[in-house]
Image (cartoon, rainbow, N blue to C red):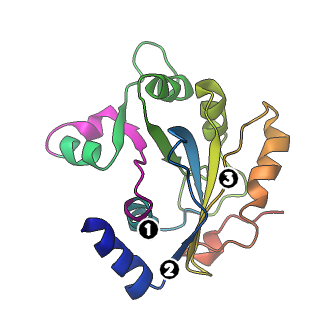
Amino acid sequence: MKKALYQFIFFKLMGWKISGTIEESTKKCVMIVVPHTSWHDFYLGIFTRGIVGLEMNFVGKKELFRFPFGYYFRWMGGEPLDRTGGLNRVEAIAAIFKNKKVFRLAIAPEGTRKKVNEWKTGFYYISLEAKVPIIPVAFDYGKKEVKLGNPFCPTGNYEQDSKVLQAFYKGVIGKIPQYSFEVN
């Protein structure tokens, strides 16, 4: 019932489409969502998750998961990030992957909704540390399309791999076009 409602709103009322798939057998991955230019990206992600029908996750500081919002954030796929014990963020998030049977982490490598010229590298090193693929996801407001890419296994050469990943986003336009990530 919920999936049908999401499909009606997303496809019929909003006029969006989804291209590509994420295989259900891909139980663990880092999904990089680009461009991230607006809070509207949040509900596009919710609709996409509901339509695709796969669990998708995010991390947030553990304080967000306290009463009264903790239950809601967990229900939405959130996982509290505990950085105590000397772990940095990459190690802490990689540890979450190790403790879960299914964990598809959605993350915006731009790190903000404002204009950036370079991605933050945390997503890449999380993928390497957790030994999971990276799946590129584009929210293209210009075409009203959510594009789901193929899994990419990082080689350890960030410079080379980032060029391959960024090529997926060539021509993609965010909700606020001037903040869109530009691929060279």
- Can you give x and y, in whole percent of width and height, for residue 42 in the image? 41, 62
Assess disc 2: are there few (<14), some (14-19) or many (≥20) residues with their C-alpha within 10 Å of its C-alpha: some
The residue at 74%/36% (across/down) is 154
- Can you give x and y, in whole percent of width and height, for residue 28 in the image? 52, 37
Say which residue label 3 marks.
150
Q: Is residue 66 left or right of residue 6?
A: left
Quarter placement of the C terminus: bottom right
1 or 3: mark nearer the eye: 3
Of callouts 1 and 3, the N-terminal one: 1
Question: Which kind of residue does numbered mark 1 sit on?
Answer: Leu
Assess disc 1: are there few (<14), some (14-19) or many (≥20) residues with their C-alpha within 10 Å of its C-alpha: some
Question: Residue 16 got which mark?
Answer: 2
Q: Are marks 1 and 2 in contact (CB under 8 Å)?
A: yes
Secondary-structure class at tag 2: loop
Secondary-structure class at tag 1: helix
Find the magenta span and give its range: 50-68
Cα distance, mark 2 to mark 3?
20 Å
